[in-house]
Image (cartoon, rainbow, N blue to C red):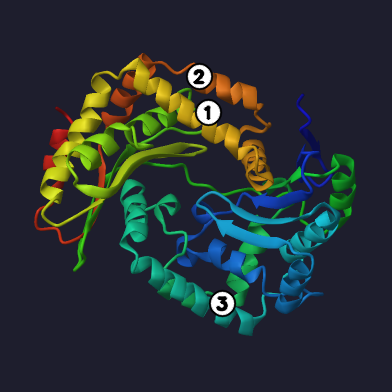
Amino acid sequence: MNTIRETVLSSGLKVVTDPMDTVETVSVGVWVEAGTRHEPAEINGVSHLLEHMAFKGTERRSAQDIAEEMDSCGGHLNAYTARDHTAYYAKVLKEDAGLALDIISDILQHSVLDSEELAREQAVVVQEISQAIDTPDDIIFDHFQAVAYPDQPLGCAVLGTEALVRSMSRDSVLGYMRDHYSASRMVLSASGRIDHDTLVAAAETAFAGLPPHLEATTQPARYRGGDFREDRDLEQVHVVLGFDGVAYDDPDYYCASVLSTLLGGGMSSRLFQEVREKRGLVYSIYSFASSYADGGLFGVYAGTGEDEVAELIPVMCDEIVKVGGGVREAEVHRARAQLKASILMSLESTTSRCEQLARQIAVYGRPLPVAEVVAKVEAITAEDCARVARRLFAGSPTFAAIGPLANVEDYDRVAARLKN
C-alpha cells in the first residue's frame, strides 16, 4: 500500500512524507534548487560555502547551540552541495522530529552569516579544496566535468577555487541566498515515524519567513567533450573516460543505469573481469551514469600504474566498443538484479527514502512508486543495452588523466579506438 502523501503549502513549499511505522526514527530535510550550476562565475563555490555557513549561527542560536541541541537528542544534522541542488537534513528519534524541523527552518531563514565566522569557514573550505587537489581520484572528476561542460556553470567545481572562496564577501553570500532560497524552489521531505498532517501544520509556521517565489536562472547543459591532462609525480595514473549521457526524463534513463552496471558496476561486470581479474591492471575500475534535468554523463574511472596504462586504455576502449556490438541476456539479468537490489535495499534506510523522495518531487514533480521503477528496470533487454551503448558511445569522448603520463595515448588515438 502506497502511503506517500504530498501537500503544497500556500507559499509554494512542497511537503512530502513516506511513513515507516516499523521504525523509531525520522529523517527530515529540505532540498533546495540551488547548486553549482546556478552560480555566477565570479562566485563559483558560493552554494557550498553557504551550506557551511548555515550551521554557524542564526538569530536565536549560536553555532554551538545548534551542535549541542542535536547532540542532546542523539540526532545527526548534515548537509551537502551538488551541481543542481543543496540539501540540509537530519535524522532523529521520532519524538524529536519537531526539533529537527525547527533547526532546519531556522538555519534556512535566519542565518546571520557573521563576518568573523565567514572568514573562519572560508579558511576551512580552502583546506577542503586543498585536500581534494591532493586526492587525485577525487579531483580527476572535477577536471572531467570541466572538460565535458566547458565555459558554463555546470562544468565548474562544487567547491570553487581558493581565490574565489577567499574573495567572497558576506553581502555576496547573503545575496545569493536571498536570490535562490525561496519556498517554490524547496522540497521538505520526511521518512520514518512521521505523521503527514502534523508535519504540514508545523511547516506552515516554521517556514513562514521564506520568500514565496524566485525564478531560477539555469543555463542549459551543453556537452562538448575534450581532453584534460596533468602530469603529476604520483604512483598511479588516474583516468576518466566518458561521454554525453541522458537526462532524468530520457526514455533511456533506466537502460543507461543497467548498462553502467553491466559494464563496470560489480565484480561480474565486463570491465572488472577483463581489466582486473584477467589482466591485473588495476585495483579500482568502475563505470557511472549521472543525470541532470537536461543532460548527463556516462563514464569509466580507473587507476593504474605508469607502465600498465599503456595496456589499460586500449582494453577499456575495446570493452566499451564491444558492448555496442551486443550483450548476453545472462549479464543483463545480473545487472538488472543488482540495480533492483540496490533500489529495494535503500528502502530500509529512512535517510535514503527521504532523499529519494525529495529528488523525485524536484525532478519529476511526483513520487515514483517503487513498483513502477522496478518494472522499468526489469523491462530492459539485451537489445536495449546494445542500442543505448551505440547511442552513448557514438559522440565525442571526454578524457581526463592525472599522474605520470608518458605512456598515456593522445586524445585523438583514444577517440579513434572508440570508432572501431
Residue 166: % across, % down: 48, 77
Amino acid type at circle 1 is Lys
User: Between 2 and 363, which is closer to the camera in this rendering?
Assistant: 2
Q: Nearer the viewer, mark 3 or mark 1?
A: 1
Q: Are marks 2 and 1 in contact (CB under 8 Å)?
A: yes
Circle 1 residue: 340
**Residue positioned 71% across, 72% down in the render:** 67
User: Between 42 and 195, which is closer to the camera in this rendering?
Assistant: 195
Q: Is residue 145 left or right of residue 113?
A: left
Instruction: Give residue 19's quadrant in the image.
Output: top right
User: Between 24 and 141, which is closer to the camera in this rendering?
Assistant: 24
Amino acid type at circle 2 is Glu
The residue tagged with tag 2: helix, strand or loop?
Answer: helix
**Residue positioned 53% across, 31% down in the render:** 341
Q: Earlier in the sequence, mark 2 or mark 1?
A: 1
Amino acid type at circle 3 is Glu
